[in-house]
Amino acid sequence: MFQTFDDLSDPSCGAPHAALLRAELDRRGLDGFLIPRADAHQGEYVPPHDCRLQWLTGFTGSAGLAAVLGKEAAIFVDGRYTIQVRDQVDMEVFPARHLINEPVTDWLADRLKPGQKLGIDAMLHTVREVRRLREVCEEAGAELVALQDNPVDSIWEDRPEPPVGQVTLYPVELAGRAAGDKIAEIQSGLKGKKADACVLTQPDSIAWLFNIRGSDVNHTPLPLSFATVPSEGRPSLYIDGRKLSNSVRDALSDLTGLEEPSEFTAGLAALGKAGAKVMIDPALAGIGIAEAITGAGGSLIEAQDPVLLPKAIKNATELKGARAAHLRDAAAFVNFLCWFDVEAPKGELDEIGAAEKLEEFRRATGALKDISFDTISGAGSNGAICHYRVSHSSNLKIPVGKPFLIDSGAQYEDGTTDITRTLAVGEVSAEMKKHFTLVLKGHIAISTARFPEGTTGAQLDTLARIDLWKAGLDFDHGTGHGVGAYLSVHEGPQRIAKTGSQPLKPGMILSNEPGYYPAGEYGIRLENLEIVTEARDVPGGERPMLGFETITLVPMDLRLVEVSLLTAAERDWLNRYHARVREEIGPLVGAKERIWLERATEAV
């Protein structure tokens, strides 16, 4: 369900909570403490029970960290949240720093003194993070102390209870593979790496592996849990038993041992005592997990979560579901666009109203489980904040004469969607059309790319930017992220970005979303989802090439296209895309919407 920042903020935090925390740190003999926006699973969506950063500072963004020392503190956020953090956080108590340009390690290096003790929650900081933190502490003559409990929890009087969302079985008719077959595949991979077991900390990896879904966090059907998978024998799933009905418990018991989360550390120690070589992902696993194993005598094999890649490579059933979900979603979106074209020019529609109406059209399908992330509904200057999220205080009426950006998605049982469109409201300027068309050219370049096996997302990323670069422009986010199958809308390891190192594989689903955001003016982004296709011969070529199949079928706003800037091939792509939208979506909408769609997809 759509929420604004106002629904989440807590005006009582800031100085009072910082004072409580400092008193607790002093009682424990600690000189400082780090509070990340994270839970023990390192997920994008954190349940209220684990929103410690929000409780302390008031910040509700999806990435951030606070550092609290005896007489100084700071909050670190990335470029998406530089405006939001100043609206939500007391800058006198927690001055804002840029997470990338001035990382917390640099800040600490300038402030830690010999003999001081810096505390962290051992489950909230990954093995990789802790290595760098320990280096900084050692260089300063300080000590990093990994705590088994969190000081914030000791002072958070009205802390919400842990989530106990009910777990459901995800039918093989939608999953495409039985859970037992998936487990066997992972076990075979462990044997190949000479690992005795692996630890899974990502709930979406666990959901995919055991063919289950949950309801513990917003927007993503995750059952918060941990798992260990041995190279031989039965896995162990550590999950709150209150989430399991008798039928779900019986079905899971055929696949895995079921344990309460409180037994997880003991299970890790048992692996250690057996001398096991245990695979963990250092980018995802908390240092507490690693130390529970090695402290009991085990050894570690550091490698990527072995479920990530098979989960990312969708099977034929998952791809069929994704296509069906996108047809359903496109029809809802076209209904919204037809409505929007009537209402927006009146000058009374605002950002919240638009986001709520789009969700209403999706709910009318009868298949919507949830939106797949917090809708970005950006009018005018708010659209220039690339990951803007509306609040009642920031909510703008959508102005005539500027583009409106709406980035949204849906969770259906057969697939997850994510789409961005930039829409003209009234007459727009030649400059706006130029910028839109440069972004469109980059979008087309990705959609039509052909590339050999082994190509990474970083190698493709330039295609989306080259026309913007020629104009002296760029955008400061990745071009594309992976998308799950009724799972996370932001899925790894695949991505199209300057740092995208994973080779793209057939069956992966990625977004294609270049943009441009002139500060303080407006935002432009165009996003479709693409399936990586099998390598095929290119006429006259020497080797087969991978490519993309576009599965998002919603018109691009032709009122924003400067046709003279498109090549003949780009015009042909746009016309073929719109012809496909008419053919496939036209029969799914009403008569009024079909008339609108015919106009919106006319050939250029």
Image (cartoon, rainbow, N blue to C red):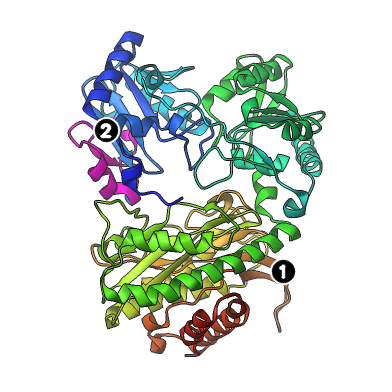
- Magenta part of the protein: which range? 80-107
Q: Is residue 364 above or below residue 51?
A: below
Q: Secondary structure at mark 2?
A: strand
Camera-side residue of 267 and 465: 267
Q: Position of residue 134 (x, y in %)?
A: 43, 24
Question: As shown in the figure, which amino acid type bears the numbered disc 2?
Answer: Ala
Numbered mark located on residue 74 in the image: 2
Identified at 45% across, 29% down, the residue is 49
Q: Position of residue 228 (x, y in %)?
A: 69, 29
CA distance for labels 1 and 2: 50 Å
- Write down the quadrant of residue 572 in the picture: bottom right
Q: Is residue 323 visible?
A: yes
Residue 300 is one of the magenta-drawn residues: no
Q: Position of residue 93 (x, y in %)?
A: 21, 31
Whether tag 1 and tag 2 are in contact, CB under 8 A, the answer is no
Residue 93 is one of the magenta-drawn residues: yes
Query: Residue under circle 1?
Result: 535
- For label 2, the crowd category at 10 Å Cα-Cα, with few meaning under 14, some 14 to 19 and many 20 or more, is many
Judged by depth in the image, the label closer to the viewer, 1 or 2, is 2
102 vs 195, left or right, is left
Q: Secondary structure at mark 1?
A: strand
Question: How many numbered marks appear?
Answer: 2
Numbered mark located on residue 260 in the image: none
Which mark is first along the chain, 2 or 1?
Answer: 2
Camera-side residue of 390 and 127: 390
- Write down the quadrant of residue 381 in the picture: bottom left
Identified at 79% across, 29% down, the residue is 234
